[in-house]
Image: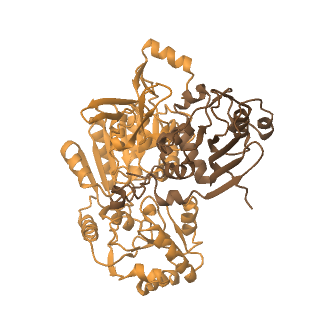
Chain colours: A brown, B orange
Amino acid sequence: MNCLLCNKPLDDQPTWQQLLGIAKTSSICPACFNGFERIDCVEEDEILDSVHSLYAYNEQARDYLHQFKFMQDIALATVFASELRNVLNDPKKIIVPIPMHPVNKKDRTFAQVDALLEASNIPFTNYLQKTTESVMGEKTRAQRLQMTELFEVLADIPNSELVFILVDDIYTTGTTLRHAARALKNKGAKRVEAVTLFRPIREK
Amino acid sequence: MPFPAASVNECVKRGWIQVIEGVTAKATWHGMHYTCNRCFNSNQLTFTTFECAQCETTCAYCRNCLNMGRVSRCSELLIWTGQAPVYPTNHRMNWQGNLTPSQQKATNELLASTKQSISHLLYAVCGSGKTEMLFQPIHYLLNEGKRVCLAAPRVDVILELLPRLKTAFPDTVVEALYGGAEVEHYDAQLILATTHQLYRFHEAFDAIFVDEADAFPYTADETLQQAVKKAVKPNGPIHFVTATPSAQLLAMNKKQGNISILARRYHGQPLPEPRNVSLWNYEKQLKKKKIPSKLLRWTKERIDNQQPFLIFFHQIELMELAETLFQQLDSRICAVHAEHEDRKERVQLLRDKEIPGLLTTTILERGITIPNVQVAVVGAEQTIFNKGALIQIGGRVGRSVPNTSGDFVLFHQGITNAMDEAKSEIRKLNKQEVPR
């Protein structure tokens, strides 16, 4: 096997730990993995009860998302499988991926957040549906803040005591996640948390 | 795609464009077997399957040529099958240089093979003026209205060749294709391309010249060799140009093509022979922040004599360790490797004598000329320094008049077969008869 990012051969000598499933097998090389900066930044506000971002959105992260989303390299969904599993392995919480509009999904041929969760073997429920084809990345901050409702909730919420975790690839201004959380809360959800893979951090 | 969808559809309707699927799947007893129809890759490890939202089946895509835009089972590849473009047949060749008798002989042989559409291997030592020998055959092909491609595995080579060819053929439409290039004329009559870019072409060229045909990754990647074969028209010749042909390339051309050997540099002086010097435990000493004494003496001598030098390392980490040590000797000494974006500028600084020397990986093993450069290889026994690499590295020495020779030293801890083979190959070439 070669590293999925830099295509250099991986040093994958078979070991007993690997055979017994104790050691995790990696799909990228240590040098590429070290390029991602773990931040574990957690923030709280009124609509989103907590937002946990795993990695800094640095150059390596930008290249990763470019290859994953725009070059449509779905194989990269496995890169953060065990890290996401570690954060999301609470069976009492309901995992809700931020969806893509069906038209955009067809263009990309897959929904990136669903792909991340499937690669990590995390069960999830598609409670939300995107109502607009517009994409956040193409908007200014002012435009984002003015947006009307982005999501509608597809099913009734069975039990308002359940905790929901929204999952997205990147947290920028938080508009998307707040819209999604508000939609769920309007349907009666009490606590809505969020986990994102990346978050930009300001240079000091 | 550079064309509007409506006009493409019109061409498909008229039968001018053939549409094929991007990835072909064949069912076998152990599952699906995929082949990419763009890069002809069929290594199953490089295919990824997924539930596709577009074709709503289990789809597969090729990761080998992903950089050029994803090709999957549900994507379509278009092949132009309509009328072939007509190219002008009056091209001016603006090149005043003279070929030496041995260069002229090799050129004539290459031209003869071109006329007969026979593959030709031009085996010419480093610094023999290979590019100039291609001008006459290319000019012949252009005047016949043929479409020609000059391909090389490395973008540095393409960038170096482009201005030379543009000056040599001032009236011809010349275009260079490489990753990130801004391309105006995909239909240019003379195309310079990295071998990767040939994935894009299907029976498009009347002749292809592959320069530096032994360089990485061309020899290591079978799909690149397939790409060259796919890009040339049936019966079109593929010519190879190299200073260090692999045994495979020599055997292939012995069987079905012609070979010209050019054993002398354009200035007629012999190739510098390598000198083996033992350098035990160099890795350990460098890690202890000490330059091994023989290497230190060699470097000081170069600095004192004001001779520019290149020191080759097998590993980036070791080279960077050494860089700090060498900088205590002279603060202007610096290192270059593949990920340095300003490596061109640093080589230029060495040419301009702004810096005394460079530490480098094998990235500078070919394609560069620095007058009076002296070369050392640290750890010549490492597997990365195979016979071809050592000959190429030695080829940096004594390329230009008046400094037609120089020191080429291999610091080693044990002599390998590759070192012996490189030395005997150089001796053999130096003994060859030179036509006058």
Name the residue at the left extreme.
Answer: B255
Asked whether residue B180 is in view, the answer is no
What residue lies at 43% left-to-right and 68% top-to-bottom? B315
x and y percentages locating residue B395 in the rendered image: 38, 65
Asked whether residue B303 is in view, the answer is yes
x and y percentages locating residue B436 in the rendered image: 28, 59
The quadrant in which the C terminus of chain A is found is bottom right
Q: In this view, does B250 lie to the left or right of B126?
A: left
Q: Which of B162 and B336 is in front in this view?
A: B336
x and y percentages locating residue A1 in the rendered image: 37, 51
What residue lies at 51% left-to-right and 35% top-to-bottom? B173
A161 versus B292 height, above or below: above
x and y percentages locating residue A46 in the rendered image: 78, 45
Q: In this view, does B6 lie to the left or right of B90?
A: right
Q: Nearer the viewer, residue B236 or A198?
A: A198
What residue lies at 77% left-to-right and 32% top-to-bottom? A147
What residue lies at 48% left-to-right and 85% top-to-bottom? B290
Q: In this view, does B434 lie to the left or right of A47?
A: left
Q: Which of B133 and B252 is in front in this view?
A: B252
**Picture quadrant where residue B147 is located:** top left
Q: Is residue B226 left or right of residue B248?
A: right
B284 versus B69 height, above or below: below
**Picture quadrant where residue B279 is located:** bottom left
Name the residue at the top extreme.
Answer: B14
All told, the count of numbered labels is 0
B10 versus A173 height, above or below: above
